[in-house]
Image (cartoon, helix red, strand yellow):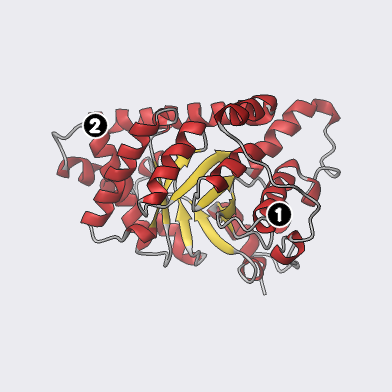
Amino acid sequence: MNQLDQLKQSTIVVADTGNFKQLAAFAPRDATTNPSLILKAVQQPDYAPLLAETVAAHRGEPLEAIVDQVLVRFGREILKVVPGRVSTEVDARLSFDTAATIARAHRLIALYEAQGVARERVLIKIAATWEGIQAARALEREGIHCNLTLLFAFCQAVACGEAGVRLISPFVGRIYDWYRKSAGAGWDEAANAGENDPGVKSVSQIYTYYKKFGIDTEVMGASFRNVGQIVALAGCDLLTISPELLAQLQASEAPVPRRLDAAAAQAAPIHAVSYNEAAFRYALNEDAMATEKLAEGIRAFAVDAAKLDAMIRVL
């Protein structure tokens, strides 16, 4: 049995791509997208006509409304292939505006529902800022489920759990990137691999905390740099994986034992914590890695959102 099939025995596998024509080969349950993945897809010959067709059908509408139509069109195509859910991201430029994030989420869900897609099959993806988490809290109360992304710090995960968020996406690879860069020439790859990988350790801590205290929020490890990080998190609720790494898993038959276990988490010697806004902001500020990677991630998604805007303007 290949590693991908083994992984599916303990973890829900999610495809991290806007390239929906690649999905069927890996049979994931869900799929995730983000502005960078959609931008990458529409620049390919296979998908450029879809962008042009969607823009033409909504010419004259406000730019942000056309962008949402493009995102939903990709989401609908993905949902023809996967049996579960698709994550569609709110514009990262709204990451510090709770009301605007809620309004954009309402529009995305309305577009999906108008096309016959039930809201249960959509996760609204929002950056895990304080403002984003509060937007998700309000949306979840309406039955609009959310995926809180760009999650690097334990305080972000705790606040998401307290807000009743459906799913979080802690970013394994970007945490690893920061620590590796910070260590410079002193980085020891072998000593920081597998369960000792700083990104893996972050997800393991969050998973253990959620299971210990009965928090229903699903943990979906994301942003992987290598198969070793994925294998080290076997047993996590979900893992969202790029097509390139899915193909590597499919090509190997090395063993994939369960590493994370909800029953084992019950015995963890940890205490419950809680964050109000001031405590959240201070805890995030104290975590240099999380502060830098959250800001960097928002900036990068905003840049790619602006590039998509520019492509649409000239069509």
Residue 192, can we see it?
A: yes
Pinpoint residue 77: horizontal percent, then vertical percent.
33, 57
Single out the residue that lies furthest toward the bottom. Answer: 1
Q: Quadrant of the N terminus?
A: bottom right
* Location of residue 240 (image quadrant): bottom right
Percent position of residue 110, x then y? 25, 50
Q: Quadrant of residue 38?
A: top left
The residue depicted at 31 percent of the width and 30 percent of the height is: 309
Question: Could you say which is closer to the camera, residue 125 or residue 315?
Answer: 125
Asked where in the image residue 2 lies, by quadrant, the reply is: bottom right
Q: For this rendering, which residue is in front, 292 or 274?
A: 274
The C terminus sits in image quarter: top left
First in sequence: mark 2 vs mark 1: 2
Q: Position of residue 64 (x, y in %)?
A: 27, 33
- Give, as a three-letter code, the residue at label 1: Thr
Give amino acid for label 2: Leu
Circle 2: element type: helix
Q: Residue at coordinates 79% horizontally, 55% vertically from top-left?
A: 268
Q: CA distance from mark 2 to mark 1?
A: 43 Å
In the image, 19 versus 46, the foreground residue is: 19
- Name the mark nearer the viewer: 2 or 1: 1
Residue at image mark 1: 208
| Neighbours of disc 1 within 10 Å: few (<14), some (14-19), many (20+) | many
Q: Which mark is residue 287?
A: none
Residue 63 marker: 2
